[in-house]
């Protein structure tokens, strides 16, 4: 290559997409590309997409339309990620100015594909490569105290609403030693918190080691203060995993535990492999083993056949489970998923009404819990400047966000903070001065 080419990547969707974009910067960095933060001065523009709901895809369609305007002569516009995988070459046919369509298992080929696109070809690579871990390619991350580390790719569960098995292929886990090596390297560069990523991350198994071994192994790395992971599957919290969480100091007291519905009948139609009784039992076991643990969840409303009574069961669950946070979604039909064949689709206005009620219920519960936390003291890791104003954003081990009056240079520091107020969702806090020793 004769000159440096500038690449811009815009990322939609989950944390694994954020990690995949860092991986793509790694792939392209090896080939002499440099990163740019704006599409205007990019030679190559990639949109890393999500396919989990229709509105996520519609946003991308709109955005690709806008990005086309920035495409310079000889420039390349690519759609990558789960939507690219789902639609494949059809996406090229529907979007004449898109040159490249690349799925999550084909990022290794990006330099070659981009070269071909520069030569005027329009092409797609959406082959599944179930061996692919990109083990030899270091991700190019933004420097900071926190980092995402993918430990498992793909998914072998078959939740009937979910497109991910079709976009990310079969489940496979990285070797424990490789993960440990990567995390140790990150710590040397100043990272003190990692989030381990996988579609059903606690079903991690590298052939010899399970998720409990992973937590203990990563938790033993010198200098690493915090471990988070997302997203676990409720029934993969084996006693071994719960025990590893309890004894590994770095594992944070927070679990994102997607429940999807509060009704056993709906869970059965979703092919979730637990009942609400079992789900609550897992929560109880975790609360017992990890004092002070907090929970967030994902909930879908309007799944086919969901009756008013079944929706009410979801509202009741929010109270029974006492979630600290919840991400709520209206069911979105995904072509290629088993739920497409289910009857009794819930009318959109009914689903919207249910979503509104659920959001209100969650908000009220979270506000009540957070108000009660005012005055508590917690360890906060200062992550970065807040989006507005001059305050810094910190995060507690329990995953609460807290705004702190600290200078930008405080990023990466750990402080003991007291919650002084809450908006209902995030907190304001003050740094607690360490007590002077009494002589
Ligand atoms: N419709 C609505 N929400 C969905 N999710 C996954 N698939 C769908 C769908 N078809 C939600 C689930 C999952 C989260 C990442 O997205 O709640 O946990």
Image (cartoon, helix red, strand yellow):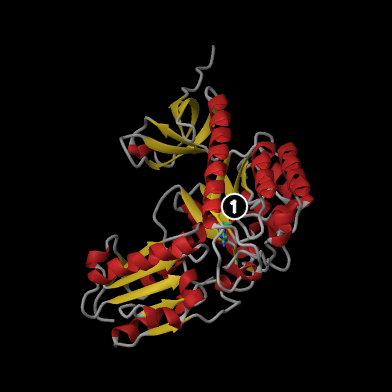
* Above or below 142: residue 95: below
Residue at (37% x, 63% y) in the render: 10
Q: Quadrant of residue 135?
A: bottom right
Q: Position of residue 28 (x, y in %)?
A: 38, 72
Quadrant of the frame with the N terminus: bottom left
Looking at this view, is 106 or 70 the one in front?
70
Which residue carries the number 1 mark? 301
Q: Quadrant of residue 319?
A: top right
Residue at (55% x, 33% y) in the render: 364
Q: Position of residue 162 (x, y in %)?
A: 60, 65
Looking at this view, is 35 or 67 the one in front?
67
* Above or below 241: residue 288: above
Q: Is residue 46 found left or right of 5 in the rendered image? A: right
- Looking at the image, the residue that sits furthest to the left is 73
**Quadrant of the rendered image holding ligand 1:** bottom right
Residue at (29% x, 83% y) in the render: 118
Q: Residues within 10 Å of mark 1 (few under 14, many from 20)?
A: many
Residue at (34% x, 80% y) in the render: 99
């Amino acid at each position: 290559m004769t000159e440096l080419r500038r690449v811009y990547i815009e990322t939609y969707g989950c944390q694994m997409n954020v990690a995949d974009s860092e991986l793509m910067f790694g792939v392209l960095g090896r080939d002499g590309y440099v990163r740019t933060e704006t599409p205007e001065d990019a030679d190559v523009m990639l949109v890393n997409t999500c396919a989990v709901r229709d509105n996520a895809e519609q946003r991308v369609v709109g955005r690709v339309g806008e990005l086309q305007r920035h495409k310079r002569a000889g420039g390349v516009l690519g759609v990558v990620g789960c939507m690219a995988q789902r639609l494949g070459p059809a996406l090229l046919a529907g979007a004449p100015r898109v040159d490249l369509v690349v799925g999550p298992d084909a990022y290794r080929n990006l330099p070659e594909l981009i070269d071909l696109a520069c030569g005027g070809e329009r092409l797609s690579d959406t082959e599944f490569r179930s061996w692919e871990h990109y083990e030899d390619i270091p991700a190019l991350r933004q420097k900071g105290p926190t980092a995402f580390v993918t430990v498992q790719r793909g998914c072998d569960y078959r939740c009937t609403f979910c497109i991910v098995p079709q976009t990310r292929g079969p489940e496979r886990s990285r070797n424990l030693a490789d993960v440990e090596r990567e995390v140790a390297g990150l710590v040397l560069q100043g990272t003190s918190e990692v989030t381990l990523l996988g579609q059903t991350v606690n079903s991690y198994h590298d052939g010899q080691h399970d998720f409990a071994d992973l937590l203990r192994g990563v938790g033993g790395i010198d200098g690493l203060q915090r471990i988070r992971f997302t997203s676990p599957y409720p029934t993969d919290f084996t006693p071994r995993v719960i025990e590893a969480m309890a004894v590994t100091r770095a594992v944070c007291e927070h679990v994102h535990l997607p429940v999807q519905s509060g009704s056993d009948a709906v869970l059965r139609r979703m092919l979730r492999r637990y009942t609400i009784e079992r789900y609550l039992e897992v929560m109880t076991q975790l609360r017992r083993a990890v004092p002070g643990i907090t929970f967030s969840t994902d909930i879908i409303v309007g799944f086919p056949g969901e009756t008013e009574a079944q929706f009410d069961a979801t509202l009741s669950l929010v109270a029974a489970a006492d979630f600290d946070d919840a991400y709520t979604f209206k069911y979105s039909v995904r072509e290629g998923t088993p739920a497409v064949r289910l009857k009794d689709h819930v009318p959109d206005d009914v689903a919207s009404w249910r979503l509104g009620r659920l959001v209100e219920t969650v908000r009220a519960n979270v506000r009540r819990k957070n108000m009660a936390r005012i005055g508590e003291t917690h360890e906060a890791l200062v992550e970065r400047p807040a989006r507005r104003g001059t305050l810094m954003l910190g995060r507690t081990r329990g995953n609460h966000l807290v705004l702190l009056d600290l200078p930008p240079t405080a990023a990466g520091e750990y402080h003991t903070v007291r919650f002084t107020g809450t908006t209902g969702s995030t907190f304001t806090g003050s740094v607690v001065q360490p007590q002077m020793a009494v002589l």
